[in-house]
């Protein structure tokens, strides 16, 4: 909460099942069967999230970059005002794209940040749910970080299995059943290291410097060419 600047409006959960479980758990907790959710398709992870969300309500895919093998981030689409939420995948590891600007919207905003959580400052107030598998930036596989704005919950007219209801884990501080202690502990060590290094602002600077080494060589060397739109390159 300290590193990301989270207020007490948000609960922080350490769950299991990876981000893949969050593809359906987010929809199960927020999307009613007669509701519509808005998704943007920017790669294999968002495509899987779209597939799972369709089990719980209507899904409108606002834009997709599949037509060009996901080498860019779609822009200029309209977000329906009646959407229950907007879902984005912020960083697409397989294709090397990343959101550098966030869409403006008044609807609740859900984001899969598995591969970039703690890598840069975030406008947290924009988001209602953020989820991230630990194994990219936080710790070993086995736990999944979920940050949820508490007032988005309890509004769907469906029975939710106890273990799949975010409110269960909020009430029990992520210890409704035995949590994955080791991955959580190592994640704590990582968070302490990030703090010692100067926080997410310092991580962003380090990532910019590291990415520049790669991209500068791709752009300089005629033996290589970049396949991803330059303005959407992932850091």
Image (cartoon, grey):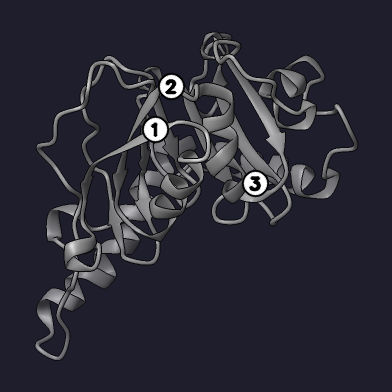
Task: Classify 10 Å Cα crowding around label 3: few (below 14), some (14-19), many (20 and above).
Answer: some
Q: Quick check: marks 1 and 2 in contact, CB under 8 Å?
A: yes
Residue 1 lies, in percent from the top left, at 58, 23
Q: Which residue is outermost to the right?
A: 178
Marker disc for residue 58: 1
Q: Which residue is mark 3?
A: 190
Q: Residue at (58%, 30%) from the top-left corner?
A: 28
Task: Classify 10 Å Cα crowding around label 1: few (below 14), some (14-19), many (20 and above).
Answer: some
Q: Earlier in the sequence, mark 1 or mark 2?
A: 2
Task: Please say if 186 is above or below 105.
Answer: below
Residue 79 lies, in percent from the top left, at 21, 27
Q: Secondary structure at mark 2?
A: loop
Q: Give the quadrant of residue 222.
A: bottom left
Q: Which residue is mark 2?
A: 34
Q: Residues under labels 1 and 2: Cα distance?
A: 7 Å
Q: Secondary structure at mark 3?
A: helix
Q: Give the quadrant of residue 225.
A: bottom left
Residue 215 lies, in percent from the top left, at 22, 69
Q: Earlier in the sequence, mark 3 or mark 2?
A: 2
Left or right placement of residue 106 versus residue 162 in this view: left
Left or right placement of residue 54 versus residue 10 in this view: left
Q: Is residue 138 shown to the viewer in this render?
A: no
């Amino acid at each position: 909460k300290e590193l990301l600047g989270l207020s007490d409006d948000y609960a922080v959960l350490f769950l299991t099942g990876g981000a893949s479980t969050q593809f359906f758990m987010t929809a199960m907790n927020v999307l009613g069967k007669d509701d519509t959710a808005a998704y943007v398709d920017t790669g294999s992870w968002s495509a899987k999230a779209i597939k799972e969300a369709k089990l719980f309500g209507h899904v409108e895919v606002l834009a997709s970059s599949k037509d060009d093998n996901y080498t860019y981030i779609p822009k200029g689409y309209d977000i329906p005002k009646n959407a229950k939420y907007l879902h984005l995948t912020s960083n697409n590891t397989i294709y090397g794209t990343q959101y550098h600007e966030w869409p403006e919207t008044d609807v609740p905003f859900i984001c899969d940040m598995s591969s970039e959580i703690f890598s840069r400052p975030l406008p947290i107030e924009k988001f209602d749910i953020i989820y991230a598998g630990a194994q990219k930036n936080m710790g070993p596989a086995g736990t999944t970080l979920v940050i949820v704005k508490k007032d988005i919950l309890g509004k769907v007219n469906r029975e939710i299995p106890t273990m799949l209801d975010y409110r269960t884990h909020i009430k029990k501080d992520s210890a409704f059943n035995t949590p994955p202690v080791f991955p959580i502990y190592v994640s704590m060590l990582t968070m302490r290291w990030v703090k010692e290094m100067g926080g997410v602002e310092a991580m962003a600077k380090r990532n910019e410097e590291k990415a520049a080494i790669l991209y500068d060589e791709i752009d300089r060397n005629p033996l290589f060419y970049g396949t991803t739109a330059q303005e959407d390159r992932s850091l």
